Amino acid sequence: MENQYAIEMLNITKRFPGIIANDNITLQLRKGEIHALLGENGAGKSTLMSVLFGLYQPEEGTIKKDGKVVSIKNPNDATALGIGMVHQHFKLVECFTVLDNIILGVEPTKGGFLQKDEARKKVLALSERYGLQIDPDAKIEDITVGMQQRTEILKMLYRDNEILIFDEPTAVLTPQEIDELMQIMRNLAAEGKSILFISHKLAEIMAVADRCSVLRKGKYIGTVDTKDTTVEALSAMMVGRDVNFHVEKADKTPGDVVLKVEGMTVASKVHKNNAVKNVSFEVRAGEIVCIAGIDGNGQTETVYGLTGLEPLVSGKITLCGKDITRAPIRERSLTGMSHIPEDRHKHGLVLDYTLEDNIVLQRYFEPEFTRHGLLQRKNIRAYAERLIEDYDIRSGQGPVTTARSMSGGNQQKAIVAREIDKAPQLLVAVQPTRGLDVGAIENIHKQIVAQRDAGKAVLLVSLEMDEVMDVSDRILVMYEGEIVGELDPKATTAEEMGLYMAGAKRKEM
Amino acid sequence: MLLLIQYMLIFASVLLLVALGGCFAEHSGVINIGLEGIMVAGALGGALMMKYLPADSSAAAVVCLSILAAMLCGIIYSLLLAVSAINFKADQTLVGTAMNLLAVAAATVFVKAINTAENPNNVSATIQYVNAKKAFLVNIGGFEFNWFMLLAVILLICANVLLYRTKFGLRLMACGEHPQAADSVGINVYKMRYAGVMLSGLLGGIGGLVYITAGVSEWKFENGVAGFGFLALAVMIFGQWKPTRIALAALLFGLFRSLSNVYTGFPFLANLNLPSNVYNMLPYIISLIVLALTSKRSAAPKAEGIPYDKGSR
């Protein structure tokens, strides 16, 4: 009988100091199928793929290609076996053209000189055959993320790779680009390529994959046919328990006004008009107010204005009865504002600091942590350890782990822990669940609701329709820098909200 | 006027060669501040070759052998940078600075030792090459054509072809821009960076030889090369790391440098009655102004100066 597997990874074990990243994992990829590899952040997906791509050597286990045992010691071996990978962070030279990036490493030459015309023909033929639209002469720095990804795919096809690994390919794409990518993957599989698709987005896996293997905390859980399973069953396999997609929360009557914004106008960094135009709203104690809208309608700038990252053109902000319109960021923080920022790398963490230093970033000057101008390392360590325990922040070396080396989900947990633990009156949470898996999302939603139940005011900014409908008590829809509607999540529908978000409907506020 | 052009071309040749050297090192991802030291090493090699070649050697032999010696000394000296920056991931700016200091001091000690061994009363660090130098020159109607000018043009063309028309160039630049990307497609970043640094040694070495034979027939090695390595770096930056633009920048800087040699020949300049120091300072002042104005829109290779570590992502 002919071997039906393109690649088999049998009983792979890979250990790192202090952690077993892959514990006896078996993964079998059939020829011509799209096989999803599902797992939470830190479940060992990336490690397993690095083993397959020759970046790591496993301690135990074998890899078979077409039924024969092979040894993959470095990426060149993998390439020689026809294995190609689109990395999560693209490996493209920004100032080179698309064509140069594709041929780099396998350049066709004659007498030592590059033969780009020959390469161009092959690239254009491939791009037509698989529906991968590119401009071979455009520079990478000038093209969209979607086209950069198509360049990466063409890199693999140009090398005649048969086994294509996609490492979280949709994380950086817009919804339209995701649809296009799905279609491209189906085309590739139809042409006989075998695809490994790493993801933690269940809907995408159900939409495009034939089979799905699940990893949890470094262990192999099982492989299922996607047509025989459901999103709920998959997420239970991934997280190890039933995940509640619906946020549980009791009714609560809002209390006093905590945040009052009057006529706020904020300038835009990208164009000459103001990004936020004369916006007024209130957030009361014990309620979650959500600002909804399509990305780029002034939500980011609203938050920048509130938190002091950008100055206001005009308007007034009152927090807990105190005018903070011109207050510096530390004063806002001390008045009771917490901020879970949109970009956790830019505004949330100092990536090269340790976890404990990041945790006391806004409080290091308090008497508990600083005495006579000297940091009280012992107290800082104790405090960090308590937060790590309470908020289940997982990392390689505990308080002294560098933030950069932590997974995205745990970086986010660290920020949430820091912002919530300082007991704010107002919590400003901007896309707090972006890029996280279902288990982590559930956890963060719980924390936010707990803040509200404890009588704090919460301002949530989100692009996710489900999150907006599920978590909030009151919805403000922003469109082109203005609040165009106030909705009650219990009385509205996603369709109605969509009309407001698209600017097709508005209430006079 | 003819003299001005002659000086301008020879100084431009020096700057062009050395700047091209810097350009190769930086495109591979290594900042080469040590060009000054490499020039001294090359100059020493070339000068010694000229000193010890038999007086009856043919002109072609003198030209070829002294260039070869300069190239070799430049390459060997550049290996200091390669080993410490690529293998040991040392700070490239510090290593380069140390190389500059070391080269002048070592050359001075070395030449002094040779001179005293020949004649106990001679404690200078000067090498003379009055006769050998003539091999490089061809007199065309009062214009002293120097073979180095031709060599510079040839190497300029070679550099341009090598960078933009061969797979070596494509791979070299990938290593300077995004070494992780280069590594992921199977390019050995360490080897490419060695190649880049050694090419800068080769070109810098020749540049050193050209510089000491440009205007004079003997060289005091305690003077080093008077900051020409740094001027070449300025030329490279002004030329935005592109060989053809570097050539134009080299001509411009060469012009200012040559003014100090020939300004007395121009009645207009002589009448200004400025001290000669002003003209000597000109190229350095210009380089300060140019760098202050152009450093913002720099096209520097993105990964230059960062040691490559396979492990980090």
Image (cartoon, coloured by chain):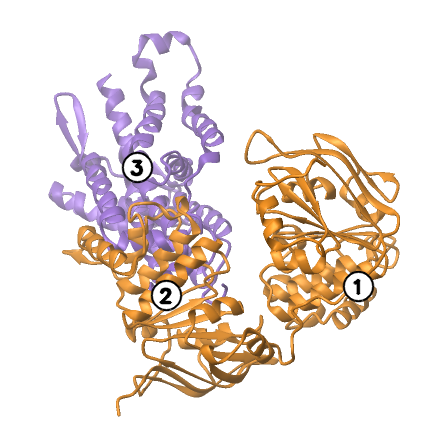
Q: Which residue is mark 2?
A: A185
Q: Name the quarter where the C terminus of chain A is drawn.
A: top right
State the image coordinates of residue A425 (x, y, percent, origin top left).
84, 52
Q: Colour of chain B?
A: purple
Q: Colour of chain A?
A: orange
Q: CA distance from mark 1 to mark 3?
A: 68 Å
Question: Looking at numbered disc 2 in the image, what kind of residue is underneath it?
Answer: Met
Q: Chain of mark 1?
A: A
B195 or B161, nearer to the observer: B161
Q: Name the quarter where the N terminus of chain A is drawn.
A: bottom left
B219 or A26, nearer to the observer: A26
Q: Chain of mark 3?
A: B
Q: Quadrant of residue A305?
A: top right
- Is tag 1's residue or tag 2's residue first in the polypeptide sequence? 2
Q: Quadrant of residue A250?
A: bottom right
Q: Is residue A260 left or right of residue A465?
A: right
Give the label on residue A450, or none: 1
Q: Which residue is mark 3?
A: B16
Q: Residue at x 14, y 46 (%)?
A: B61
State the image coordinates of residue A140 (x, y, percent, origin top left).
38, 48
